[in-house]
Image (cartoon, rainbow, N blue to C red):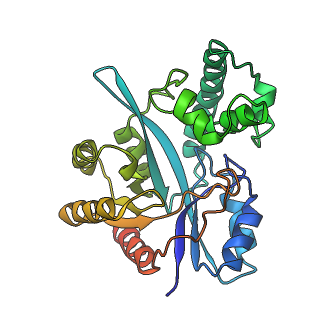
Amino acid sequence: MKKIDLHVHTNKSDGTFSPEEVVDYAHSIGLAAIGITDHDTVAGIGPAIEQAKKYDIEIVPGIEISAEWTEEKQELEIHMLGYFINWQSQDFQKKLDDLSVARVKRAEKIIEKLKQYGISLDMEDVQEFAPSTESIGRLHIAQAMVKEGCVSSINRAFDQYIGNNKPCYVSKYQLNPEGAAQIIKEIGGIAVIAHPGLLNLDFVDNLIHRLVKNGLDGIEVYYPEHRNNVITHLKEIAKEYNLLVTGGTDCHGLAKERILMGTLDIPYELLEKMKQRIEGVRS
């Protein structure tokens, strides 16, 4: 069976592998295709496509956009994946630049909040783990916290301090999930909700119902932390709304302590269905 992994990060956002290293590793484990889905940047797509010319492997140009859902004083970070996007669009790049500025401001606010809990970091500590200031995210802050001995692990950093609704959490640029889906659609892409099984499933059902009206194309069903009952439930929702089923490991290289790429058996036929959908949209 030809296998794929449609959720992979490079060091152009918060992965530890360069785009070239990502492609080399994907080839070494026999993947037929990978999706380059860095956070709020397309900088890794071009180098990955060039490197893939050495091998018989497909690169799906993608992105992962973070959005905020806010209701009744509760905030949740919702991630939207975009596939087959027009990643060279200048208008799209301008929107990504705005998101990059927002990432820097958010990181600065998180660092200030951490000081209230006796954790003293500065931007230089965090930037050591980021390819550029503009790409800084919470994972880079967590990595700096581990290096400085503030926490024992990246998971502890998120669970105790900087995860959703934790004491040092800071909302991102106010882009709602519908807006993120629309941005992806505007650049000719397929909009897919990322790892919904990490959220309350009743909430996910309502969210997907709402997003379908705003152009949602698919659900990331296969994901390392999705249990079998969650996968079954998400497949049923996808069937109900005629949504695509996708999957990926959310690989960040060694940032999550082990390489996840290729650890799920995601069949190539899912990518074929995505191609059929995008051809139908563009015809």
**Farthest residue toward the top?**
116
x 28%, y 65%: residue: 232
Which residue corresponds to the image point at 72% horizontal and 61% vertical from the top-left?
Answer: 19
Question: Which part of the image, by quadrant, shows the C terminus?
Answer: bottom left
Q: Is residue 63 above or below residue 232?
A: above
Left/right of residue 37 with respect to residue 209 in the rendered view? right
Q: Is residue 27 above or below residue 141?
A: below
Place of residue 235 in the rendered image (x, y in percent of width and height, measured from the top left): 28, 65
Q: Residue 10 location, x and y as percent?
A: 68, 55
Instruction: Give whichever of 232, 148 is nearer the camera.
Output: 148
User: Residue drawn 75% across and 32% down?
Assistant: 126
Q: Based on the displayed image, in which of its 4 quarters is residue 23 positioned?
A: bottom right
Question: Can the viewer see residue 187 in this picture?
Answer: no
242 sits to left or right of 88: left
Q: Pick out the residue farthest to the front.
A: 152
Position above or below: 242 against 272? above
Q: Quadrant of residue 116?
A: top right
Relative to residue 59, is residue 140 drawn left or right?
A: right
Q: Residue at x 68, y 15 (%)?
A: 118
Q: Nearer the viewer, residue 115 or 247?
A: 115
| Residue 113 percent across, percent down from the top left | 61, 16
187 to 40, vertically: above or below: below
